[in-house]
Amino acid sequence: MNRYLAEFLGTTALVFVGCAAITIGGLGAALGSPQEISAVALLPIASAFGLTVAALAYGIGPISGCHINPAVSIGAWAAGRLPASDLPGYIAAQLLGGVVGAALLYFVLLGKAGGYDVATQGLGQTGWSGYAVTQAFIVEFVATFLFLVVILGATSRDGMTPAAGLAIGFALFVMHLAFIRATGASLNPARSLGPAVFVGGQALSDVWLYLLAPPLGAFTAGLMFRSTVLEAR
């Protein structure tokens, strides 16, 4: 149970802090889609997500492994590093955490002077309005695959190496710099689902891609590690 609680709290924190950088931080003012994020805002938003993951890796990593992402749990299971019996609990805790994190952020924004219209100003939701769906799917698949290569390479069945948290956080930081203006650089079904539940509309219609592409990319990476194609020898 401690592991599931850690995953719930960690995912809640990731969505709350990361999406707050876009909304409360004013880095995505009047955000209708990730394509509207300015070049100046890319660095602080990428830092918010990357540094949050790095910090949480050391905070809850010893408890649950700090997956805070259903795709990561699926990749770890495919690699033989997470028992199948634990997978449903991890995913449920993460998805719930994503929704609760978005709910907390929405509640805070409702107290903003002058009010806050989530339909027009957003909640840090993901989307790919500037790209075709095939290209968006490929971006999320490949980016998550690469992210899992870093995670599985920096960790082992016995836990994290001392620098694993930094490597994983930096990898997420780089993926955001590269792909946030294409798809929002989700790489995480829980991160996309949470804001979409409250924004609705196109964000909710688009969420299927983030529920499918990142897990498939992670699963592929996990299989490659399990088959020792990418395992160190």
Image: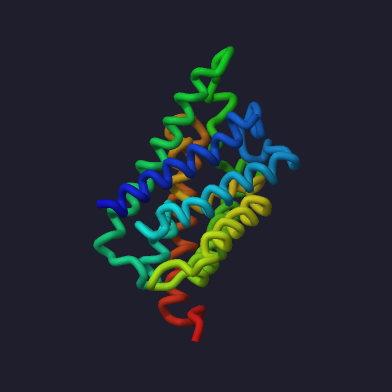
- Which residue reaches farthest top? 114
Give the answer, above or below, for where 221 lies relative to 165: below
The answer to whether residue 131 is visible is no
Q: Is residue 114 above or below residue 213?
A: above
Residue 162 percent across, percent down from the top left: 51, 67
Count the labels in the image.
0
Whole-percent x and y of residue 146? 56, 65
Task: Name the colour scheme.
Answer: rainbow
Q: Residue at x 44, y 70 (%)?
A: 222
The quarter of the picture where residue 114 lies is top right
Instruction: Residue 113: tell me if it is visible.
Output: yes
Query: Is residue 219 found left or right of 121 in the rendered image?
Result: left
Q: Front-most of 59 and 148?
A: 59
Q: Residue furthest bottom?
A: 233
Residue 171: x and y, percent?
Answer: 59, 59
Residue at 50%, 18% in the rendered image: 111
Residue 144: x percent and y percent? Answer: 53, 59
Residue lying at 49% horizontally and 63% vertically, measured from the top left: 217
161 displayed left or right of 39 = left
Q: Is residue 104 left or right of residue 86?
A: right
Work out whether residue 194 or residue 232 is closer to the camera in this orientation and state it.
Answer: 232
Tell me which residue sits at (38%, 73%) in the image.
157
